Image: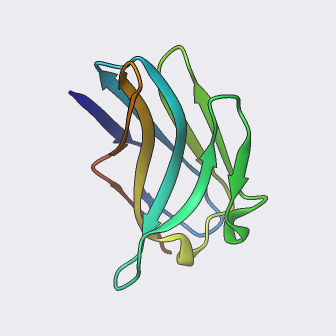
Amino acid sequence: QVQLVESGGGLVQPGGSLRLSCAASGTIFSVFAMGWYRQAPGEQRELVTIITSGGSTNYADSVKGRFTISRDNTKNTVYLQMNSLKPEDTAVYYCNAVIEVRTGVRKSYWGQGTQVTVSS
């Protein structure tokens, strides 16, 4: 069984910063793409950013220049550094990872979500 455990959410003032972490554990052969999604109240879940196993990244236009995704392959962990936060960044943030759990079998896993609230 594979688990993704997130940490680092909280309440921050506009202009502030937060760093989210997401660690994958369990029976893992390889970890492929890892990413962060978010879902605001009444809205659909949206992709924030994604990083491949080789380190290539992609960002939603709304977070470009403010958010940075990174990963530590030795720890099967992905990070999201969020700077210059805005009230519209308020959402539950979910980590996602595509993981090979046995030879030739890849599955998509989700974290439990962590609340990020940007408010004065």
Q: Nearer the viewer, residue 26 or 91?
A: 26
The quadrant in which residue 83 appears is: bottom right
Q: Residue furthest right?
A: 65
In this rendering, the answer to whether 44 lies above or below 64 is: below
The quadrant in which residue 19 appears is: top right
Task: Residue 75: give x, y in percent of width and height.
Answer: 48, 18
Q: Is residue 61 visible?
A: yes
Q: Residue furthest bottom?
A: 42
- At x 61% / y 48%, what residue is drawn? 50
Judging from the image, the colouring scheme is rainbow
In this rendering, the answer to whether 58 lies above or below 19 is: below
Q: Nearer the viewer, residue 27 or 3?
A: 27
Q: Is residue 9 visible?
A: no
- At x 61% / y 54%, what residue is drawn? 49
In this rendering, the answer to whether 96 lies above or below 32 is: below
The quadrant in which residue 79 appears is: top right
Task: Residue 109: give x, y in percent of width and height.
Answer: 34, 43
